[in-house]
Amino acid sequence: MKSIIAEELVKTYDKGKVRALDSLNLDVEEGTVLGILGPNGAGKTTTVRILATLLRPDSGRASVAGIDVLKNPEKVREVIGLSGQYAAVDEILTGYDNLVMFGELYHLGKKNAVIRANELLERFSLTEAAKRPIKTYSGGMRRRLDLAASLIVKPKVLFLDEPTTGLDPRGRQEMWGVIEELVKDGVTLLLTTQYLEEADQLADEIAVIDTGKVIARGTSDALKKQVGGERLEVVVESAHIAKTLEIVSSVSGVKASLDEGLRQISAPVSTGSVALFEVLKSLDDAGIHALDVGLKRPSLDDVFLSLTGHSAEAKEESK
Amino acid sequence: MSALRDTAIITQRQLRLLTRVPEVLIFSTIQPVMFVLLFRYVFGGSISTGQPGGYVQLLMPGIFVQTVAFTLAGTASGLAEDMKKGLIDRFRSLPISQSALVVGRTLGDSLLNIVVLAVMGIAGYAVGWRPSTGLGNVALGFLFLLLFGYALSWVGVLVGLSASDARVVQNVSFIVTFPLTFLSNAFAPTTGMPRALQYFAEWNPVSTMVAACRQLFGVENQFGATAGSFPSEHPLTTSLIYMVIIMVIFIPLSLRRYRNSLN
Ligand SMILES: Nc1ncnc2c1ncn2[C@@H]1O[C@H](COP(=O)(O)OP(=O)(O)OP(=O)(O)O)[C@@H](O)[C@H]1O
Ligand SMILES: [Mg+2]
């Protein structure tokens, strides 16, 4: 069963001047994770806000957990959890106060709201900071609290808009752990990200969006295949470059290329580890010691570049 | 029923501001208290009134009204802040009554005024303010003030939801509140103003509120301008009418604006 369906969503801002969504189509199978991957301004937040009933599209249809988003927004709100792009918790209140308040707003009653708040604080390693105002929290703690707030009543469908943007590598790692735990519990998750690595790590399927449209969709592996196969890369001492170029070219069947600065020789291969083994063996026979050798699968960056003609990061910087 | 409960929870949140950040209370009372001292001891000396008990009797109602008028700015900037932080999105994604958030905020902000007014009253008492009427009238005066704050809080909702960022909100609130409080009879007689301004000052809701409070606290309103005009003859009725008009216009407008922020 599909837990999230979006059909032909169109959304314009500024009286039609900005076309944020341009006939966007999506669907997410129940209990799976869809990663929406796109650069700044691609329409990620707009998509999430429409699905979470916060924004009405100009046209198109959407349903969440089988409920029509436009016709029954109140019903949708009962089954979703949302953690927006900016951690939306009350700065002035403590972490504990925030969770109790949201619990009460979910009509748990004071007593149950308190129990649930403590459970969530524990689960997200925030017990120690529970009685401190959010102002004093780190970015990662805020994010975790925000996520906790969206899980107060176990949602069927969870929306996370750029859950790790702005976190340091450790905070990101922690957040990934937390999200992976959630997914094990069987929630349907729609997650947006600008980090190719993050979609790769967390999502079952990835939809790449750019300028309000889905431009590619599939598993991480399928997307990578679409861009091309693997490359074999070898780094050697300067003295051995010429011989190594010869060996790699002969295994690949294509003339190998050289990055002189890195002393790295690379070439596309179709036989993966077999080719790797062959190269290692030939190098060994020639008495060459490889400093580094590996098979590199195309990154999602490469995917983005080949799909859109511009790299995700480049666009980000120009903004 | 659950709409009421939702509203109560949001109201509570506003009030919790007081216990979590006492600075808010300090700052929202410090300015009016400074005004009291400034007018009482700096300008007060040069404003001659035949008022028994002195200028401070005329001044305090003016300060009270000015203080509650700033509820507009408080609500507006608080709401704008919540919007910017995405908190409004979070509230709106919850299965709660959609108007609870704004109704709760206006109620909470108005209840905060109770505390602020109490502090001001004490400060006034310390510098010689003595209402000469009974407890009933004084209480009614404060009720009027709270209601006025509540009505203006709804104007604040509209301002807060309409403006694009917090600084704009500050400026707009200032532009709305400043002329209203100073082109009035709050601090000085309006008789010195040019004719056109006198009319404005006469009909200005801040003036009618100040006049109403003066009446309820037992002071003759010496700062009114054109004697015999309707607002100066009936300050209580006029103020009440103003408050009703403000609420009738701004409550539906603000609620609609809130619902339409969906687009
Ligand atoms: N309220 C608004 N008014 C005008 N334009 C808007 C508004 N919100 C978004 N846009 C525009 O719509 C487009 C899509 O925006 P959206 O916020 O959905 O992108 P995003 O993928 O979430 O970007 P980011 O990675 O920066 O969060 C952008 O061009 C943006 O400038
Ligand atoms: Mg976004």
Image (cartoon, coloured by chain):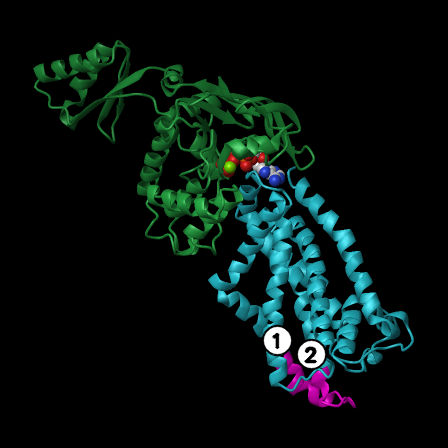
Residue A311 placement: quadrant: top left
* Residue depicted at x 79% and y 77%: B215
- What quarter of the picture does the C terminus of chain B occupy? top right
> Quick check: B224 left or right of B23?
right
On screen, residue A90 above or below A57: below
Q: Is residue A235 visible?
A: no
- From the image, tell me which residue sits under label 2: B60
- From the image, tell me which residue sits under label 1: B120
* Residue depicted at x 39% and y 52%: A137
Report crowding for label 2: few under 14, some 14 to 19, many 20 or more residues within 10 A (C-alpha): many
Do tag 1 and tag 2 residues touch (Cβ < 8 Å)? yes
- Tell me residue B226's x, y (percent): 89, 76
| Distance between mark 1 and mark 2 Cα atoms | 9 Å
**In the depicted view, which residue is nearer to us: B151 or B1?**
B1
Residue A52 placement: quadrant: top right
- Tell me residue B156's x, y (percent): 67, 56
- What quarter of the picture does the N terminus of chain B occupy? top right
Name the tint of chain A in the rendering.
green
Q: Amino acid at mark 2?
A: Met
Which residues are drawn in magenta? B36-57
Name the tint of chain B in the rendering.
cyan
> Quick check: B79 left or right of A145?
right
The quarter of the picture showing ligand 1: top right
Q: Is residue A245 visible?
A: yes
In terms of sequence position, does the residue under pointer 1 or pointer 2 come before the other?
A: 2
**In the depicted view, which residue is nearer to us: B12 or B38?**
B12
> Quick check: A40 left or right of A272?
right
